[in-house]
Image (cartoon, rainbow, N blue to C red):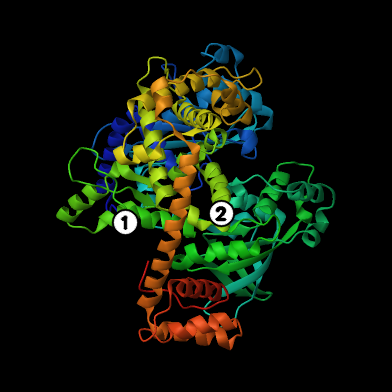
Amino acid sequence: MADSLEVFHHEFFQDIHSAADADGRYVEDTFLYLFCQHLEEAGELETADRVQYLSPRGIRIDGYGGDPADTDGVLSLIVADYYPEQNVATLTATEMNAIFNRATNFLTKSLDSKFRNSLEETSPAFGLADLIAGRWEQINKIRILLISNRILSERVDGRDAGEVKGVPVSYGVWDLGRLHRYVTSGQGREDIEIDLEDFGGHIPVLPAHLADAGYQAYLAVIPGPQLAAIYDKWGARLLEQNVRVFLQARGNVNKGLRITLENTPEMFFAYNNGIAATAESLTTRQTSDGLVISGIKNLQIVNGGQTTASIHAASRKKENDLSRVFVQMKLSIVDPATALEVVPKISEYANTQNRVNAADFFANHPFHIRMETFSRRMFAPSQDGTFRESKWFYERARGQYLDARAHLTTAQRRKFDLEYPKKQMYTKTDLAKFLMLWRGCPDIVSKGAQKNFAEFAHQIGEEWARNADSFNELFYQHAIAKAIVFRATETQVSNQDWYEGGYRAQIVAHAISKLAHDAEAAGRSVDFDQIWRSQAVSEPMEAALLEAARAANDVLTTPPPSSRNVTEWAKQKACWQRLMNHEVKWPAAWLRQLVPISEVKQAKRSAKKDQRVLNGIEAQTAVLAEGAAFWQQLREWGNARKLLTPIELGVLDVATQIPRKIPSDKQCEIILTVLARLQSEGCQLKLTKTT
């Protein structure tokens, strides 16, 4: 990764301009898009929808963080400060306050019907102003975020919170320095430092670990008002390891919590299972009453997100008495180096109500590991008629691409950039977006990267459990083809005379889903093999995508009176339903390029068979690489605890005699399955010779 602020600024500046050129966007649009991707990953925003409005009368807004009705009554507004020069510049207090004032002016003007009526009804600015006015009675907190590629002056202490018409307003700045610290932190978030003395005082705890266990855990009871206050400050960032926060609640858990909090708060402790949490470290001290916690670093609530959010929501109502609410907490101390592996397991095993599929705890899920393996191994066909082939870099975990380049020499970096061009890097949230559109989910994609990814994780997890061989080389090639289609559509839409700006993301999403829907309805499929081979979209398909985009634009920009915000209309199933029923006259040349679905299904069946063979080869390679001593240790560990069946003991006996005896590919698959199961039982042995 970039190891200095100047290098980071240069790379970020170049990324903005190259992405703007490649995508056909304005530089300011690309700046906001790339910056807000980091804010979504950091948990600062659940989604970031673009709204550009600038008036010479000192009014400005650049985006917002979704409908307050979906964010617990919190309205998040975004205002951008893009500095177009390559040198690192300073943002002064005077400039910061002027920028915040412009955003506040937009907020207050939105409540004025005369101002709203002066805006073009199809514009994003009208949609946001109308949303603010329509939701005002539900809004209980306003956050205004300033994003800047300048450095905030060290003389700036901050900006005091205020209020608008009785609603509290807080201000936050993400400048270049803060973004640099976040991106180079290597942990996927800013530190959360909680001084409990600022939130009602220390918490008594009971140690729940042995001195020699190599692991620390504590039991505590936290007062409801204290938990609500902590959540009020950090919000969903406390729940980022718990993907369920982004999923719709299944069952009646929230309703039951609400009823208890409102009617019998003193019984909450008895009725509720409490929360399971992790932290990197604690500040503790011994008192006359026993051990207490006074500080927590990087608290994560891995089970009990609904409990926490429900208590926080109840705290907003004056009639609720949270002083009678107490919550039990199991707190585990997790080393940051092993957090990605350990925290998902804690969360998975702790979640017993509304069970969350294991796929919800992604990053290390086998699906992503397999996609990453394909991306490092499979060359894409040459695009320019030369013999130079390249690969698509799948970033399974944040920062992998920059990490891979970080310590290379200049010559090695040039070679890396030819093999993995920056324009061919994509993240797991990108992949979720590309694939979900072909699954008929443009409404979910329009809800933002995190919510879309959560639904994608749920679907892929279930499909992986049914048949992991469906995710094979053909699946990977078709996924890249869908990425190519997505990016080509983005570029083409930006160049159309009818495109007025503002809703490109929603138009592209709905256009691709519409094209996929109508092709499937006709018993046909896009020829993804051809797109993979050419690494481009054909002219007939470009024409078809533009027809779909025009239809999507028509539907999106004519929302019903009850939903005049186009961005929010795009997130509704009714919008997608209307587009599905909309008739499009498809180009004849594109229709001739479609292939029968029966052919696609046959190709997928063949690819599954090939994957089964590949699984056996990979399993045998992994088992042989570890050697007999490793498998002897595994056999002894499992046998001592009576965790092995006679068949498993038999195949492990073969492995303990490598190389005199060689286990078959089927036996090796069994051996690796046994290893995974024993690891879940506490075995510390891990494969070391393969990745």
x 39%, y 67%: residue: 617
Image location (x, y in percent) of residue 275: 67, 60
Is there any visible trace of residue 559 in the rendered image? yes
| Residue at mark 1 to residue at mark 2: CA–CA distance | 24 Å
Image location (x, y in percent) of residue 293: 60, 67
Looking at the rendered structure, the secondary structure element under dot 1 is helix
Which quadrant is the N terminus positioned in? bottom left
x 66%, y 55%: residue: 226
Which residue is most to the left? Answer: 411
Residue 116 sits in quarter = top right
Residue 3 sits in quarter = bottom left
Q: 10 Å neighbourhood of mark 1: few (<14), some, or many (≥20)?
A: few
Q: 10 Å neighbourhood of mark 2: few (<14), some, or many (≥20)?
A: many
Does 27 appear above or below 272? above
The amino acid type found where label 1 is placed reads: Arg
Q: Nearer the viewer, residue 445 or 289?
A: 445
Q: Nearer the viewer, residue 376 or 317?
A: 376
Residue to which mark 2 is pinned: 461
Does 460 appear above or below 546? below
Is there any visible trace of residue 83 in the rendered image? no
Tell whether 660 sits left or right of 46: left
What mark, if any, has residue 678 been given in the picture?
Answer: none
x 41%, y 75%: residue: 623
Image location (x, y in percent) of residue 345: 56, 65
x 61%, y 39%: residue: 71
Q: Earlier in the sequence, mark 1 or mark 2?
A: 1
Which quadrant is the C terminus positioned in? bottom left
Image location (x, y in percent) of residue 445: 52, 37
Residue to which mark 1 is pinned: 377
